[in-house]
Amino acid sequence: MTVDELNELQQLLDQGHLLDAQQCAALLAEVWRLKTVNSSKAIEARLAREEADQVAAALNVTRAENDALRRELEQLIAIKGLPVCELETRWSNCAVRKRKGTNGGPHPPTFDPQDPKTSGA
C-alpha cells in the first residue's frame, strides 16, 4: 500500500465514512507487512549484536595471548638479549635452551642490531 492510499483511507475515516471489505483487507495486509519488516529488522539487529559480542570476545582473547607472548619475549630478552642461532631462522628454540641451560656449552651470541653478523643485514 502506498502512502497516498493510506492518506485516502485516513481522510475517509476522518470524514466519518466506513471502509469497505477490500479497503479493510488492504489495510490489514499493510499492517502484517509492516510487522514482518519490523520483526526481520529486530532479528538482524540481534544477530549483529551477537556477532559484535563474539568478535569483541575473540579480540579480548587475542589481546590476552599477545600480552602473554610479549611478557615471555621480554623475559627472554632480559636473560641476555635475543640469542642468534646459526642453524635456525628462529631465535625461540635457542632462547628456550639458553633459559633452561641445556645448550651444553657457551651461550650463543646475542642479537646486536649494530652488528652485521647478527642483525641479518
Image (cartoon, rainbow, N blue to C red):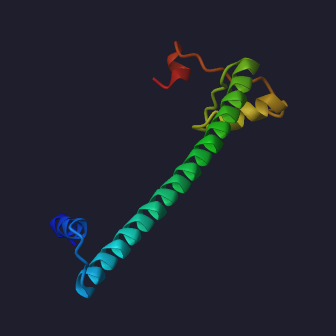
Q: Position of residue 16 (x, y in %)?
A: 24, 71
Q: Above or below — where is 42 with respect to 115?
A: below
Q: Is residue 38 left or right of residue 78?
A: left
Q: Is residue 65 left or right of residue 55?
A: right
* Residue name at image x 67 percent, y 34 percent: 69
Marker count (numbered): 0
* Residue name at image x 77 percent, y 29 percent: 98
Tell which of 63 and 108 is nearer to you: 63
Q: Above or below — where is 29 with respect to 16?
A: below
Q: Is residue 98 left or right of residue 4?
A: right
Q: Is residue 58 left or right of residue 29?
A: right
Q: Residue furthest top?
A: 114
Q: Which quarter of the image is occupied by the N terminus?
A: bottom left
Q: Position of residue 52 (x, y in %)?
A: 52, 50
When asked about the image quadrant of residue 100, the answer is top right
Tell which of 73 and 43 is nearer to you: 43
Q: Above or below — where is 108 with respect to 53?
A: above
Q: Residue furthest front?
A: 16
Q: Residue furthest bottom?
A: 21
Q: Above or below — where is 82 with respect to 42?
A: above
Q: Position of residue 44 (x, y in %)?
A: 45, 61
Residue 104 seen by the camera: no
* Residue name at image x 77 percent, y 34 percent: 97
* Residue name at image x 83 percent, y 34 percent: 102
Residue 53 seen by the camera: yes
Tell which of 111 and 4 is nearer to you: 4
When asked about the image quadrant of residue 66, the answer is top right
Q: Position of residue 77 (x, y in %)?
A: 69, 22
Q: Which quarter of the image is occupied by the C terminus?
A: top left
